[in-house]
Structure formats: C-alpha cells, structure tokens
Image: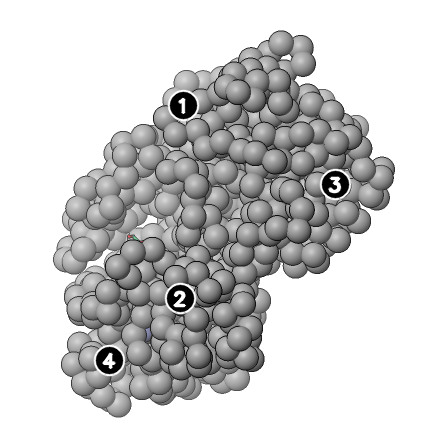
Amino acid sequence: MKTDFTFGVDYYPEHWPRERWETDAAMMHELGIQVVRMGEFSWHKMEPVDGEYHFEWLDEALEVLKKQGIKGILGTPSAAPPKWLVDKYPEILPVDDHGQRYHFGGRHHDCQSNPIYRGYIRRFVTAMAEHFKDNDNVVGWQIDNEFGNAHAGLCMCESCAARFREWLEAKYEKVEALNEAWGTYFWSQEYDTFGQVDPPYVTTVGRNPSHMLDWKRFCSDLIVDFQAMQADIIRKICPNHFITHNFMGFSWKVNYFDLAKKLDFITHDQYTMLSTDEWPADDKILQTPDFAAATLELMRGTKKAPFWIMEQQSSITGWTHMAPAPRPGQIRLWTAKSVAYGADTIVYFRWRSCLGGTEQYWHGILPHSGIPSRAYREIEGTISDLAPVMEKIRGAMPKNRAAMLFSYDQEYAMQIQPHHPDLDYVGNVVSIYKGFFSHHTGMDFISDETDYKDYKILAAPLQYLMTGERLCKMEEFVKTGGILLLNMRAGVKDENNIAMSHRRLPGDLADLAGLEVPEYDCLRGFTVPIKWQDGEAGTARKWCDIPELQGAEAIAAYDGEFYAGSAAIAKNRYGKGWVYYLATEPDDATMARLAGEILAEAGIVDDFAALPTGVEVAFRGDYAFLMNHDAAEKHLDLPKGWEAILGETEAIAGYGVVVLEKKEA
Ligand code: GLA
Ligand code: ZN
C-alpha cells in the first residue's frame, strides 16, 4: 500500500480536451506532483447508460499520468448520481424537513438509505473496483466526497424514516422506553408503536429536543454505514489499495471519530479562506490561526495519526462571491500549517480552474487559461521547500500533554438548544483552545472513547449531556493527578437530552468541581465584568453560571449584576489533581490568563514565550514549525537547542515559515 507521497493535485481530465492531458501531466511532473485524485463526481462519464460501464477514459488518464511517474487515487462518484438514475427512480432524491424533495442539478442529491440507490452503488463500486484492481498505477480510493456536505438538513424521505424506526427499535427495544427517554408526556406526544415515529419534520410549533438528538445520531450512523458498504466492497476486491475519505474539519453531520474507523487514514479539505453561496461576513472569510489550528488538531485526532490533505487551497476560492486573492506567501504558509499539524501528504484543489459549472471561481493552481501564473509559481516554490522537510518528519506526531474532549453529542445538543444566539459548541471549544494556543500549547482532540490518562490537562467544554461513565473517567483522571477544565452548562442533561434533577447543577460533577450552580443568567445584549483576585479585569459573555462554592476557591469573580462576588472561575482540589470551573465564556485575555495558570499548575513551560505576536508555532516530534500570519517580517528570539532546517533563526519573513529541528542540548 503506497502512501508515502508528498504532493498531489485533484484533477478532472474529463473536463479538458484529450490533447491537453499530456501537457497537464508533464506540467504536474515538473511541479513535483506525485499523485492525482480523480473521478469522484464522474458517474455519468463512467456509466452513461444504466449498466453500461466506460472506464476507458480513466484508464487512459492513468496511463498518461503513469508516463510522468504520477499515481492515481480514484473517487467513488456517489456524491453525484446521474440524471438517468434520478429520472428512473426519483425517490433517491433527498427530502427536506417539510417533506419536499430536492431537485437534480447540484450534488449530493442522494438519499443514503434508499435500497434501490444502494443497489446501484453496490453494483457500480463493484464494477469500478473490479476494473481497477490490477491497475498498478492506482494506489487508493476516496469514498464519495465530503459526506454531509449537502442540503441544509438531512434526508427525511420515507426510506430514511423507515430506517430511523428500525434504528430506534434496536436502541430502545420497547416503545415505552422511547417515550420515557424522549419525555413524550409533554404535549401529548406519546407513541404507541415504533411505526408511528417520524423524522423530526417541521411542526406547527417546537420540536422535541430528545427526538432531534436521536435523529442527528441516526443520520451520522447512516452515513457511517453508507461509507462502510462501499469500503467493504473495495477492501475485498482491492486489498492492496488504501481507502480514505475527505473530511471537512468541524463539519458535524457525521461523527468523524466513527467515520475514521474503517479508513486506512483520513484526509481533510483545508480551505483557509472560504467563500461559497452562503456568503460569510467579510471578517469570517479568513479562518483565524487558532480556528484553523483547532480544525487540524481535530482532523489528526479522529484517528490519532498523521493524515492527508485531499484538498488544500491553491488560489482564490469562491462560488457566486469570491474571497480575496491569497497574498504572496499565504498559500505556502497554509500548506506548511497543514503539515505542521500532522499532514504527511498535501493534495491541492484543483489542478486548473474549471470553465463551466458552479465552481468556475474556485480557482486552481492553473487559471482558466492554463498558463502558469503566481499561484503556480508559489506552489512550485512551496513544493521544493517543503518536500524535503516532509520526507524527514513523515509519521511524526506532536507530544501534546493537553487534550480537548470533543463530542458530536454535545455539538448536536447545543445546535438543538444553543441557549444564546451567539453560543455554539465549536465556537466555545475554539475559544478555550485559543487560550492554550496563545501559550504555544497544542492539544490533542479526543473523543469520549479515548483514555484520558495519556494527558496532564483535559479541557472538557460544555459537558451539557453527562453520563455516569464519563463522570467515572473524569474522577479517575483528576484523582490521579490530572487537571480538568470544565465550563458552564455542565451536567445539565442526561444522554437522552432530558434535564437531570437528582441534585443541583452541575449534577454529579459538583463533587469534582467543589461547587453547585443553583442559578444562571443568559446575557442577552449585555456582558458582565469579571475581576481576578489581583484586580485584573475581564468580561463574561453570553452566559453566566452563578456558582455557590462548596470547597472550591474562586480565582475570579463577577463584578456586576445581582451576582457580583460569585465565582466566575473556581479551582478545586480533588485527589492529586485539580478541577477548574469556568462559569462563563470569557473574553480572550481572560481565557489566555486562565490557560496560563492551568499550564503553570501542570508544570508545562512555554519555551517559545518570546515569539512575536502573529507568529504561530506547532510541533511534530522533534520539529517545530514557526508560521508568521502577518505581512510584516518579525525578529525571532528562539530558545536554545533548535536549528533551522528551513528558513533562518534570526527572523521570519511576512507570511513566512521557519522549520526547526531539536538538537541534543
Ligand atoms: C469541496 C469539495 C470540492 C469542491 C470544493 C470547492 O471541498 O470537496 O469538490 O467543491 O469544495 O467548493
Ligand atoms: Zn432518504
């Protein structure tokens, strides 16, 4: 299974005249491209008529690439079923929460549970795998494309509804248990049979939060199952090929920890500037360095292993609106950042900007004209600079002592009831991550299934849905010397999204935290001042838990409202460890100070404290990547014992990258 590539591109040979292919392949070779992904949307080209397969063009493209020493990854095209299939079986088109069917003409217009559709997928994937199994220029497969990157909601067709009922029956066995778990006594929502339960369609008013939570879990499981169906076929027919899928960072429709299990490695699509039809606010187009870092930490965390970037931004992004042109150096910088957080291979999206279709303005390495310009030249330099570094660090992982507990269940529950219009799970996670990031500390993103004992610090934001099992793990972790950071809305509900009532908030976490939360406040249109013990000021935003301390010590308190003097941040000794309770979502400076105190408590020293602002550092094994996100050059004052293997140790250029190797002290 060959996977030791450094650079690749996403290529659509079928979009271009046959005469151009040799030129493309030769140019790729010259650029340093070793691998190409193809075919993930080309179902109609491969099966133009029901049951009639045409893989010759892909054979030919693979042959042309082979002459330049370039290998191929094939995508299964289930993200774009052809019109003939949709016309023959309109029921494979997905349905929204009004029961309305979507139309053909975009992508991901497929229902992943529909048995007829699944039959077609099985037949197609089998034929494709059989055809390419002995092609020595194929190294691996990408299943589908960006699962969950579809219409706003999840398919609520009759087939999905039926499968949801089966899923519920397997989970609850008796309908009484479902009624209990969902609190259906409210508004007379009791079900008499599983057959009566629908997906959470739009109602006259309100929806049951427990129903919605199970629906989101079900949809994630459905996608995992849909991937498994394809992976099992390919695995059997092509045992020497790798199987992967391209993830989308903090996208949520499928639980990536689950999706990663069947894959040899995961890949991620990294667009540091994002602009599609859902036009984000101008200040949201560019991912902040901390947000992008957290994204990549999660991607590495889904398999706790190095990964690939299957689509790395290569130029201007945009569908109907466009993002600004990446400044000279930024494409190189963002590429290096992917590597810094764990990518062993970088595949750029896309080789050449397409002439037709929705993504005409999602630019490639080559512009429409096909004539190399600035993006091409920057990538040429990036490859020659980074490929040798990547060869050296392949496989290396960071040695993080801090972890972030990341949970799709908490994400779903907070989507269903965000509390405050600006409060969201990922935003809250990233706000905490940012505190540690400001001290140059990386964090492993881990799931509920992971053991905490490899870590000294565990941040567990929004432990809104709580389980006894997690509580035991946390108790054990802290008792034996771990430092746990909890925050507001901890222990509010059980795993079914039903409020807990057996004791005051934060429920059974109260003993760990050394406090109770009899009251809280949602900060609609106002903030609340915070004061640290030494008088330093901060700000509470969005939400305030109002704790009553029972053993914990306040390290910062609210300085306003009727709860002035109550703890905003508390610290409690538990066994050999500590529990911090952050009762609000504070401003960045407050979070940075708290993270600094936690790191000090853990004895973790920031060797790179003297880095200028705007310069990020990330570690892989004995290597450190310094990345300057500002346009201006910065002077560096580095700790002893590091040598530069890319760039220099005295200064870092605007948008520049320096890679350091740790030498024996
Ligand atoms: C995603 C997809 C690609 C393409 C790009 C640009 O990442 O995987 O097929 O659509 O976005 O929009
Ligand atoms: Zn469906």
Instruction: Report the quarter where the C terminus lies.
Output: top right
Q: Nearer the viewer, mark 3 or mark 4?
A: 3
Q: Secondary structure at mark 4?
A: helix
Q: Residues within 10 Å of mark 2 (few under 14, many from 20)?
A: few
Look at the numbered disc 1 and give the secondary structure of its residue. Answer: loop
Residue 512, numbered label = 3
The answer to whether the residue labelled 3 contacts the one labelled 2, judged by CB atoms less than 8 Å apart, is no
Question: In this orientation, which residue lies closer to the viewer: 309 or 660?
Answer: 309
Q: Hey, what amino acid is under mark 4?
A: Glu
Between tags 2 and 4, which lies in front?
Answer: 2
Ligand 2 occupies quarter: bottom left
Residue 204, percent from left and from top: 26, 59
What residue would you read off at disc 4? 91
Amino acid type for the residue under numbered disc 2: Ser
Q: Which residue is mark 1?
A: 526
In terms of sequence position, does the residue under pointer 3 or pointer 4 come before the other?
4
Image location (x, y in percent) of residue 98: 24, 65
Left or right: 287 as drawn, with respect to 351: right
Distance from Cα at disc 1 to Cα at disc 4: 49 Å
Q: Nearer the viewer, mark 1 or mark 4?
A: 1
The dot on residue 128 is none
